[in-house]
Image: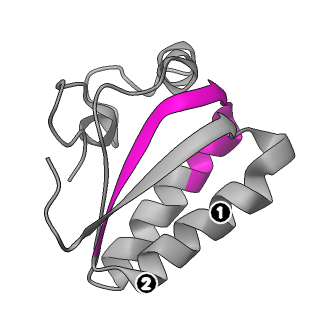
Amino acid sequence: MTDERTHMLVLTGDAGIKNATEVATNLRQAIENHPAVAIDTRALSAADVTTVQSLLAARVSARAQGKELRLLAPLGGPLQAVLSEAGFLTPGQEHAAFWSEQPDKPAGH
């Protein structure tokens, strides 16, 4: 699933607006310190559109630095619910591949 160069970042608890700064800091530090980052969201207890925005911003930042950021599948329930309710999983949506669900495989690229 991940190799020696890939850092595993596990997001836990509430990754919504109340903790957006902490989530963004953890993502930024992981990207700065590793060539590839895999994010595990299964331990999230809460997520909202801020979580989605933080993940997309981190993905853009990683790409700009020539690094890789991907999500591990399956996605955590709270994140999956936000993505579904907000329409991020609809066919043709710009970031749909980033959120794809394929158990035991990276969810994004």
Which three-letter amino acid code belongs to the residue tagged 2? Asn
Which range is magenta? 36-54
Dividing the picture into quadrants, the one containing residue 11 is top right
- Residue 45 against residue 21 in the figure, above or below: above
49 is higher (above) or lower (below) than 2: above
Q: Which residue is mark 2?
A: 33
Circles 2, 1 touching at the beta carbon (< 8 Å): no
Q: Which residue is mark 1?
A: 24
- Left or right placement of residue 24 versus residue 87 in this view: right
Q: Residue at x 50, y 17 (%)?
A: 77
**Reading the chain from its start, which is encountered first: label 2 or label 1?**
1
Q: Is residue 65 shown left or right of residue 49?
A: left
Under mark 1, the amino acid is Ala
SS state under label 1: helix
* Residue 57 versus residue 81 in the image, above or below: below
* Residue 109 image point, x, y percent: 20, 53
From the top left corner, tell me how far across and down residue 57 is, in percent: 53, 62
Given this view, does label 2 or label 1 mark the residue nearer the observer? 2
Would residue 52 be seen by someone viewing this image from the given angle?
A: no
User: Residue 83 or 2: which is nearer the viewer?
Assistant: 2
As drawn, which residue projects farthest toward the right? 18
Q: Position of residue 80 (x, y in %)?
A: 47, 21
Left or right: 47 with respect to 59? right
In the image, is residue 72 part of the stretch drawn in magenta?
A: no
**Snapshot quadrant of residue 5:** bottom left
Q: Callout 2: helix, strand or loop?
A: helix
